[in-house]
Image (spheres, rainbow, N blue to C red):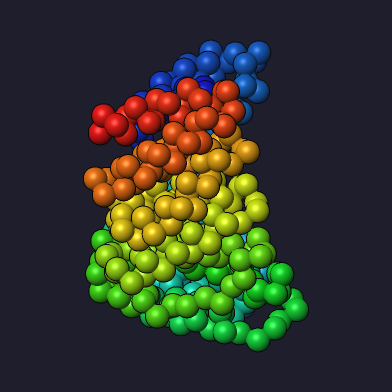
Amino acid sequence: MIRAIRACKTAAEERAVVRKECASIRASISENDQDYMHRNLAKLMFIHMLEMARDLAPEVERLLQFRDPNIRKKAALCTIRIIKKVPDLAENFINAAAALLKEKHHGVLITGAQLCTDMCKVSTEAHEHFRKKCLDGVVKLLRDLANSPYAPEYDISGITDPLLHIRLLRLLYVLGQGDADASDTMNDVATKTETNKNAGNAILYECVATIMNIEDNGGLRVLAVNILGRFLSSRDNNIRYVALNMLMKAISLDSQAVQRHRATILECVKDPDASIRKRALELVYLLVNESNAKPLTKELVDYLEVSDPEFKGDLTAKICSIVEK
């Protein structure tokens, strides 16, 4: 029964399965079938728990305003689960969720930002409310966080609470989507981070993802691509691979800004790591145009002579594609 319910793609399908099971259970009970009584009770408990989210929602909403911040944090986490199960309940939590973004407690702020982000995905009303009422507050929060003095309880590698930074940036990512005015409000959000620390790189990556997702802003796009260019010079393979992936998305938004990092990308084609080589080669192929086709092809042909035997096939195929293009 559980497998059948979880396989349902719509609420109507789920209700049909439950109705069928309930009819079967009624028949079994009326026949006084003792052998299956315990199984029938277990089934009824499971069916009862399927509406449980609706029953608990008012109580969870009350706990979102509880005086203990740890209770508010747990209630926010519970609300995230509730709206995933029953998206139409999201509208009941709009005001309570917005209030969490005014908290001082970082644990409540992190869960509050996550809750607002998830609510935006399931409710257009919540999305509009947070965009109109909370955007300025989130921008101020990020600015204050970036400029905050050293706080030992929140410090990770010299950065104040990078986890909160990232949650707030992801909320901006959602709020700025498709709205030029909202995107303009985010223009002055700066972040002081170091690229020699993982925490700093994580924040910079989220900044780039947010810039690429919000409405068109040439200056910010160039800044984002330059950050990715710095990532390409990292000694960490994961950071270089992530940068190449993001640059492939950036080409469609600002090809000229990516072209400035062509030399660094070409160096990545010669990287010892096979996955980085392949990704960089894909990127080089996307960068080819009439003005740079000859020098780029020459670089690749020169490298073909000294490349690893297992890479020669991919390299040759791309060179032929470039010539054809």
Quarter of the figure with residue 286:
top left
Q: Looking at this view, is 32 or 121 the one in front?
A: 121
Q: Looking at this view, is 217 or 267 the one in front?
A: 267
Asked if one can make out residue 204 in the rendered structure from this viewpoint, the answer is yes
Residue 301, position in %: x, y? 44, 34
Residue occupying the far right of the picture: 152
Residue 169, position in %: x, y? 47, 66
Residue 220, position in %: x, y? 36, 70
Residue at image position (33%, 51%) is 251
Residue 293, position in %: x, y? 31, 42
Above or below, 274 against 1 in this view is below
Asked if one can make out residue 132 in the rendered structure from this viewpoint, the answer is no
Above or below, 201 against 159 in this view is above
**Quadrant in which the C terminus appears:** top left
Residue at image position (59%, 62%) is 201
Residue at image position (70%, 83%) is 150
Above or below, 153 against 298 in this view is below
Q: Looking at this view, is 305 or 28 the one in front?
A: 305
Residue at image position (57%, 84%) is 147
Q: How many marks?
A: 0
